[in-house]
Image (cartoon, helix red, strand yellow):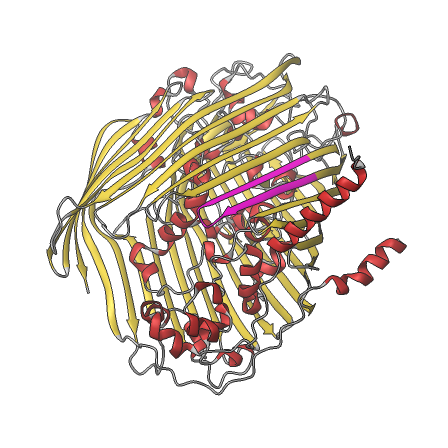
Amino acid sequence: MVKVPSVKLGIVALSVAGLVFASQNAKPADSSKPAEYAGSETCQACHEDIFKAFGRNRHHTVEASKGIRGPSLQWAGKACESCHGPGGKHAESASASDIVNPAKVRPAESERICLGCHKNTFAHAGRVQGGHGRYQVACVSCHSVHKPDAEAITTGRNKAINAECAGCHVQVWAQFQRPHTHRLPEGAMSCVDCHNPHGSFLPRMVNTVNANEPGCVRCHSDKRGPFAFEHPPVKMEGCQTCHEPHGSANPRMLTRHEERFVCLECHANVGLSAAQTHTIGGVPPAFHDLRSPIYRNCSVCHIKTHGSQVDRSFLK
Amino acid sequence: MRTLLVLFTLLPLMAQDAPKPAPEPAPAAPDKTPRDTGVEGSIDAGYRWVDFRGGNFATYRSVVNLGEGPKLFNVDGLIRSADRKFFDRISVQGMGWGGDPYSTFRADAFKERLYDLRVDYRNIAYYNFLPSYADPLLSRGIVSTEQAFDTRIRTFDTELRLLPGTRFVPYFAFDRNSDGGSGVTTFVVQSNQYPVGNRISNHEDRYRGGVQIQFSKFHATLEGGGTSFHDDQLVSYSGDPIYGNRANPIFGQRLFLSSAAQAYRVTGDSIFTRAMVSYSPFSWLDLSGQFLYSLPTTSVVYDQTNTGNFVDLQTLEFYASQHDNATAYANQPHSSGSYLVDIHPSRRLRILESLSSDRFHVASSQVYSDLTNLAPAAVSTNDVDRIYVNYNRHQTEAMFDLTSYLTVRGGFRYVWGDAQTEGSITAPQFQPNQTADLRQKVGLAGFQFRMKQKLTVNGDLEVGTTSRAFFRTSLYNYKRSSIRARYQASSALSFSVAQSLTTNSNPDTNINLDFLYSQSSLGFQWVPAAAKRFTVLGDYTFSRLRSDINYFIPQALIPAVSQYRDNAHTITALIEGSPVTGRFAPRFSAGGSYFKSSGTRPTAYYQPQARISFPIREHIQWNTEWRWYGMNEAVYAFEGFRAHVFMTSLRLIR
C-alpha cells in the first residue's frame, strides 16, 4: 500500500486544473503567414448582400475615405477589415474561424473594436456611473453595422428605438402600459430622450443637459430654477423622488396613490430637529387636520411644489 | 503602499497584448459600392373616429387624448442625391399631424466629409384634468380639480456637425423648449384658496457649440453654451365673488374673491461648459475624465392685486384689497467632475476605478412688499435662502473572464457627501438651518454567462449599508439584484426571463422604512424569417411594491404607518401575419396590452387593438385599425372611461 500525501495530490490536481484552464484560453497557434488584408472587393465576392446593404450605411464612410486625414485613412478600401480584422486567410480558407466576428467575440473585445474609432463619444467618458458596457452588453447588441440607414425610417425612429430597448427591458416596457406615462408607446418620445445607453454622469444612465443638469429639464425647463426658495429633494435626488417617470397608476405619475402620502413620507412630523432625525425635511410638525379634504391635497395650497420664486412655503 | 507601487510597476509586464501596429496607409480605393439615387418613402393619411362609450371624458383626455378628424398619421421619406453636390441623403419622418396630441417631425441631412445636420421638432399636448389629483371639494360631491393643465410642450432641437476631416469635428446646436396654454390653479390668500384661471407661457433657448478632437490615442470634446429662459405666468380672475374652499364663515363673515391678478415675470440665463478627455497611453490602459460646469441664474418680478373679503389670521382683521409685489434673484453654481482608469492587464482581466464629484449651491435673496387697505404703508420683508450640497462617489470594480463564456465582476463603492440648508423650506422659525450627511458603502457583484449565442444570462447584485442619508426615504440599507436570461431556441423562437428585486430599510425608530419592489417577467418571440407568415410576441410581467414608513398624524401627533401596496400584472401580446400568400395578400395584426393592479389604488387599463392592411395596388395600401381604451378605478370610480377608436387610411408608397 503506497501512501500519497494529500498535499502532493493537491498540487498535482491544481497543476492539471491549471493546464486545462490555460489550454482552454490559450491563443490559437500563430499562423506561419502574417495577417494580410484582402480588401473590401474580395469580401464583396462572397458577401454580396452585406456589401450592398453596407453601401447605404454610415459606416460606408470608412470605405470611401480617400483624401480624409486621420484614422480612417488607414482603412480606405478596407472598411470590412477595419472591424473584422485582416481577412486574407479567411478569403483563402473561407472558414469562419479565420475571421473576427464582433457579434460573436466576448463583449469586451467587441467593444474594443468599436471604441477604436468611437472612443470620443459621451459613451466613454460617461461610463463612470454605469452604462451597458459595464454589464458586458456589446455595442452590436443594439447597433447594426451593416444595415442600411433607411430601414430605420420605415417604422419610425422613436418606435424602433423603443422596440430595441424593450427587447431586453421587458419590465420597464411593462410600466409604460400603465395609464399615466410619458408618451413612449405613442411614438412621440423614445428611451434615448431621457437615457444615454452609453453611460452618463448621472445614475441610471439619465441624460444630462446644460452640461450637468438632469435631462428632465430639457423639456420641463420651468422646473429647472434656480428658485428663490428651493425644494431640496428636487435638486438633490431628482424628480424620481416623487414621480415614476416610466409610468404609474397614480395621477401625475406620482409614487403614491394620494398626494398627501407623497409629502408625508418626508414631512412626517417626527422629531424636532434635523440633528435628531439626521435627515432634511422631516420637520417641523404641520398641524393640518388630514380629516379635512382641503388638507389631503397638499398642492391645493402649496402650488409651487417644485420651488417658488416668491413664497418660502410654496403658496404662490 | 509599497506593495501597491510594485503592483502598478508590474502592470505593464502583465500586459499580454503588444500594441498592434496600425496598418500601413493604403492608397484610396475607388469607391465601387452601389449608390442608389432617387426618392423613396410613404404617406399615410386618413380619418379617425372616437366612439366614447362612457365614463369621465376629462380622464380620457388626460390619459389617451386621441381626437377625431382627418389626420396625417405618418410620413417618411428618403432622398438620395445623384450628384451628391449638396447632400448625400436627406431623410424625413413625421407623425401625428392634423390636431393629434403628439406631433413629431425629424429631418436628417448628411454629406460625406462635409456636414451632418439633424432637425427635430415635437409638439406634445399636456392635458391633465384628473379629479382625484386635487379635489378638496370631493366630500361635497363636486368632482373637479384645482390643479389642471391644457398646454402644449414644444421642443425644437437642431444640431450641425461639420466634417472637414476626422481629427477635428466642430458642432453647433440650438434647442428651444416651450410650454404654453391654459390651466386651473389656486389663488391662495391666507386661510382660503380660490380656483382661478391660469395662463402658462414659458420658453427656454439653448445654444451650444464645441469641437471633438480625435487622435489615435487622445480624444477630447470641448463644449460651451448658454441658455435664456422666460416665464410669464399669469393668474387672473374677475367676476362674481367666488367663495373658495372654505365654506364656513369666520366670525360670521364669508371669505370671497372678487378679482385677482397675479403676474410672474421670471427671466433667467446660464452658461455651461463641458470638457471631456480620454487618453490611451498603452494598449492596456485607458484614462478618461470630464469636467462639467453650469451657472444658471434667475431674476423675478412678481406682482399681485386682489379684491374681495380676506382675513389676516394673525391679527384677525378683515381686509378688502391687497397689493403685493416682490423681486428676487437666485443663482446656482454647479461643478461636476469625474475620472475613470480602465486597466486591462490581460485579455481576461479588467479593472475599473472611478471617482466622481458633484457640488452645487443655491443662493437667493428676495424683497417682498405687502400692502392692504388696512395699513397706511406697505410692509416690506427681506429673505434669503441657501442650499449647499457636496456629493462624491468612488468605485473600484474588476471584471474577469473565467472562461470564454463566463465573466464575473466584483467591486466596492463608497458614497459620501454633505448638505446644508439655511433658511428651511418649511417654517424658518422652527428650523433655520438643517444639515445632513451621506455615508454609504456598497458591495458590487455580477456575472455574465454566454453559451454559443444561444443562451445569455446576466446577473447583478448591489448591497449597500448606510450610516447617514440625506432624506428619510433615501436609499439606506438596501439590496438590488437582477437576473436576466435570454435563450434563442431556434432562429425564429426566443425566450427571455427577468427577475429584479430592490429592498430598502431604515431602522431609525423615527423612520422605520421598509421598502420592497420586485418584478418578474417572461417573454417569448416567434419571428420566423423564412416563412414570413406569422410572428407572435408576448410578455407577462408581475410587479410587487410594498412600502411602510412611520409618520405622525398631524392633527393629533399620533404615530402611524404610511402603507402603500401595488401588485400589478401586465400582459402585452402581438400576433402579426398574413393568412394567404401572394402579391396583394392582406396582412393583419392583433394584440395590445392589459394592465391590472391591486393594492392601495386598484386600477385596470387595457388597450387591445387590431389592424388590417390591404395592398390595393403596388404602391397603395388601405389600412383599418380598431383600438379600445378602457380604464377602471376601483376606489376612484369616477375616473374610469371606455372608448372605441377607429381609424382608416391610405398609405401611398414610393
Q: Residue at x 66, y 26 (%)?
A: B505
Establish if B530 lies above or below B142. Answer: below
The spot of residue A74 in percent (x, y) is: 53, 80
By secondary structure, the bulk of the magenta-drawn segment is best described as strand
Q: Position of residue B284 (x, y in %)?
A: 69, 64
Nearer-the-camera pick, B498 or B399: B399
Residue ID at (55%, 17%): A290
Question: Is residue B94 or residue B310 the one in the foreground?
Answer: B94
Q: Is residue B141 above or below residue A89?
A: above
Q: Residue at x 47, y 35 (%)?
A: A253
Judging depth in this view, the residue of B174 and B499 nearest the camera is B499
Q: Is residue B622 among the parts visible in the rendering?
A: yes
Toward the front, the furthest residue is: A1
The answer to whether one can see residue B418 in this image is: no
Q: Does residue B372 appear left or right of residue B101 in this picture?
A: right
Q: Give, as a single range, the part of the protein colored magenta.
A: B443-463
Left or right? Give the position of B590 relative to A302.
left
Q: Residue furthest right?
A: B2
Verify whether residue B159 appears in magenta.
no
Residue B377 quadrant: top right
**Horizontal and vertical percent for residue B50?**
21, 37
A130 and B600: which is toward the camera:
A130
